[in-house]
Image (spheres, grey):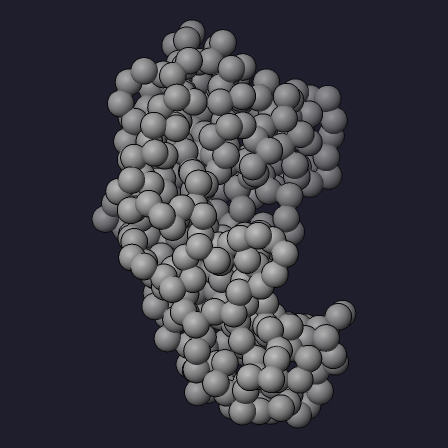
Amino acid sequence: MICRHFGECGGCSLYELSYEEQLRRKKESLYRLLKPFYNAEIEFFGSMKEHFRGRAEYKIYHDEEGCSYAMRHMDKRRFVKLKECPMVLESIESRMWRLLEYVNGDEELKSRLFGVEFLSCASGETLITMLYHRKLEDAWIKRAKELESRLSACIIGRSRKQKVVLNKEYVTEKLLVGERKYLYRHYEQSFTQPNPSVNEKMISWAVKGACRYGEGDFCELYAGAGNFTIPLSTLFPRCIATEISKRSIGAAKENCALNGIANIEFVRMSSEEFTEALKGRREFNRLKSIDLGEYDLKTVLVDPPRAGLDEGTRRLAAGFETIIYISCNPQTLARDLADLCKTHLIVEAALFDQFPYTSHMEAGVILKSKKV
């Protein structure tokens, strides 16, 4: 794939390499990082070469030519006005340029617009958030509703201390895992996996690993809106999942209802707090209806932010017989494995290329306790 903005737009740093060469280098990098802990084969899951991103955020650049989408230049000091962006899903690409045309022809939509965010998914549903440096009045709402109809998308307007939802504030993703289709509500400005097709592969890999190595009841830390928890819950008698975001907990419960899942308890607490609760060091009102002593927790999945696991969570994870670790930063994964591999052995590893044309990697490892 060739984008006319390669070499300028800061969104893609590996533009000089073919996709195959990018993937080869990422494979070598992950092999090096895991070598102290694991010498067997690593599974690799590639991405589509174009139209793979389900999220996109653009600055709106104003000049004598009107409004343009813009991204930070690779030199970090200026912006690049975009004429194309073949990385985004076709459901976004088919709407983004028409939206810009409508905005440039309508002063009400154009005035003090400074950013546009797109959220879409494999199902094709698309949500568009328009960001303004002014209060949005009835005139804007009228124009935005007309635009919503023309684009067959849902539009949200945001300005300082104001949020205007014209229709709904989520898209419904449909992912095929094994032979079952799962539904997820992805809310505006909440975390979602950026590459739907690779996310599908990532969930499927975790489910297969849990089928092989999972035991007892299941626990997930950093559960988000249930991306992994919901499919994995079908393999275990009971599940408990923690997440710090109130919005994500709400979405996770909605997603359980959408999929007819009833064996998961979602708890709003940090991994550090959950560690204290499991160890009996603190009591939490959020757990008053849940008896942790009834759970036979032997399998845990962790999907932490780029900083990886804190020391307490590493100690907590080390108490499980099976650990499924999904990492968006293999550097901190390797750091955490230096501790986890004192008590566990890696039995499977994988690389998921969520971010083609960048150096970012998503990795997964499954560990089994040495005591088993």
Residue drawn at the location 68% of the way across and 80% of the way down: 112
User: What percent of the width, then of the height, locates residue 125?
Assistant: 40, 70
Q: Quadrant of residue 259?
A: bottom left
In depth, the one of 103 and 7 nearer the eye is: 7
User: What percent of the width, then of the height, locates residue 45?
Assistant: 29, 40
Residue lying at the far top of the rendered structure: 371
Q: Quadrant of residue 43?
A: top left
Looking at the rendered image, the quarter that the C terminus falls into is top left
In depth, the one of 99 and 327 nearer the eye is: 99
Looking at the rendered image, the quarter that the N terminus falls into is bottom left
User: From what the image shows, is residue 261 above or below residue 222?
Assistant: below
Q: Quadrant of residue 230?
A: top left
Image label count: 0
User: What percent of the width, then of the height, locates residue 155?
Assistant: 54, 77
User: From what the image shows, is residue 5 above or below residue 355?
Assistant: below
Residue drawn at the location 38% of the way across and 50% of the way down: 15
Q: Is residue 167 left or right of residue 151?
A: right
User: What percent of the width, then of the height, locates residue 70?
Assistant: 54, 67
- Residue 256 in view here: no
Residue drawn at the location 30% of the way across and 27% of the way down: 42
In depth, the one of 372 and 216 nearer the eye is: 372
User: From what the image shows, is residue 32 above or below residue 111?
Assistant: above
Q: Is residue 181 left or right of residue 309?
A: left
- Residue 212 in view here: yes
Residue drawn at the location 32% of the way across and 15% of the way down: 39
